Each structure stands twice: as C-alpha cells, then as structure tokens.
Amino acid sequence: MIFCDTHTHLYLKEFEEDRGEVIQRAKNVGVEYFFLPNIDSGSITAMNNLRSAYPENCFAMMGLHPTSVKENFEEELALVEKELHSGSYKAVGEVGIDLYWDKTFRPQQYEAFHRQIEWALEMDLPLIIHSRESYNEIMEVLGHFKGKPLKGIFHCFSGTAEQAKRITDMGFYLGIGGVLTFKNSKLSESLRDIPVENILLETDAPFLAPVPHRGKRNESTYIPLIAQKLADIKGMSTAEVAEITTAGALKLFGINK
C-alpha cells in the first residue's frame, strides 16, 4: 500500500530533533509522498530545505495562511507571488479565511484569499483551502470565480453532509485527517454518501493527531489509521482506500509515478 499525506508541516520546529526518523517511520508504513503547505515568509526556507533533502518524497506548496494575514499582508503576498513564479510549487496553499482565532484582519483575509485564487487560476495550480469558522465566507469568495476551472482541497474538512456535497460538486476534494477518528466527530455521517474518489488523506502534522494518539504530536506515520477508519465507514479495504486516494492526490498535484 502506498499513501500520500496531502497536508503535513514536517518542516516545523516540532520535528527538529527527529525529522529524519519521522519521515522514515512514515515510509515504513507506506507513506511515500508528503505535501508541505506554506504558512508565511517565516516558513519558506525550512519548507524548501526539507523538499531539497527529500526531492522524491516531499513537495512544497506556496501561499499565505489566513492567520498570518496582518498589517504587512501586501508584503507577504508579494513574496508569495514571486515564489510561485519560480514554477517549482505544486499548489497555492494553504490559503483561505479563518474567523476562529482573530477577526481583526477579516477584510484583508478576503483580499489575500481572492488574490491567491487568481494566481492559482493563472498558473493552473490546485488551491489548498483553510476554512475555519468561515464556510459561508469561503463560498462567497469562490462564488466570484463561478465557471472558472478551480480545483484543490478543502483542508481539514469537518462540515456537514450538505457542505461536503456542495464542495465535491464544485470539483474539490475533501481533505480528511485525524478528526475522523475522534469519538464525538460527526464526519462519518457527513462522508457517508461521498465517494472515496472525492476524498484525500492528510494529517496536518504536528496538529490533530488521530486516536489513539490524540493530544500528542501528530506525524505522517498515522495516515494508515485515518485510511483504516475511512475504509471501515465505506465498507472497503484499507488497500482500496490507499489506491484510490493516492491516485487522486498524484493526479491533482500533477505528479507522474
């Protein structure tokens, strides 16, 4: 079985002491591909260093995370645009709107998201969308691009069945991670009628570790746990989930293997 972790921050300081071991553990359980979403100017160097160290396995994405949209967002966006034009990134991400932590820069978050969508369209790249407490706002912005060939992933999806269907009807994938394994999660119900072909696996490491590691540092090694839970929900084998989700991820990111 070969898996993809379509959203992992393995370049962060939480992995400084054992990053190589973490990647090897993941590879030992079949996780071969790691997609690294950018946060802001402070994460670019570490992310690209990791990509350079594992060019066959680690793939970088470029974007400005909504929680990093502050007074200097124009400066940050200029750097994102410059990096994207280098032509070496697999997606525009992670981008979006986050109204959970801080609403101070809400208008700027809208502007940053809108502009990064334009770049994704211009460069024919997938969007990696962060939508925390902002589903309606995200849909409002995406509505300005109706009829355009948008594609990508709603990262860390945790919404309703109706939202899941609307997102997949738009041609986006649902990024599903450790939350699926949580005891009180309603994701199983939300995904019941969504084909596995519309789902991709992710960890968001080092955050949101699945059961039985909940509350601890997350890592890409746990992707098979998420795959197993999804397989149980869908009444299929973990191997089938691995095959379908990996094929979907490699196709979305334009990787020929």
Image: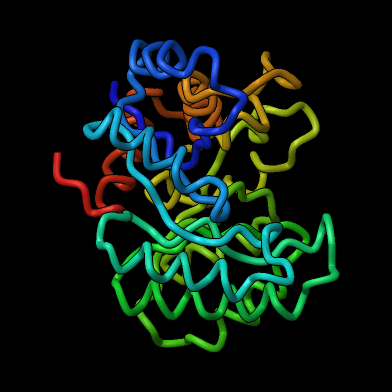
Q: Quadrant of the C terminus?
A: top left
Residue for point 36% across, 24% down: 31
Spot occupied by residue 141 in the image (x, y as percentages of width and height) = 61, 81
Residue for point 52% across, 32% down: 230
Query: Measured along the vertical axis of the image, is residue 197 above or below residue 207?
Result: below
The quadrant in which residue 35 appears is top left
Spot occupied by residue 214 in the image (x, y as percentages of width and height) = 72, 21
Spot occupied by residue 82 in the image (x, y as percentages of width and height) = 38, 68
Q: Is residue 192 visible?
A: yes
Comparing 131 with 50, the one in front is 50
Comparing 139 with 103, the one in front is 103
Residue for point 45% across, 55% down: 173
Comparing 236 with 53, the one in front is 53
Query: Measured along the vertical axis of the image, is residue 246 above or below residue 139?
Result: above
Toward the left, the furthest residue is 257
Q: Is residue 252 visible?
A: no
Left or right placement of residue 105 versus residue 238 in this view: right
Query: Measured along the vertical axis of the image, is residue 100 above or below residue 137?
Result: above
The quadrant in which residue 24 appears is top left
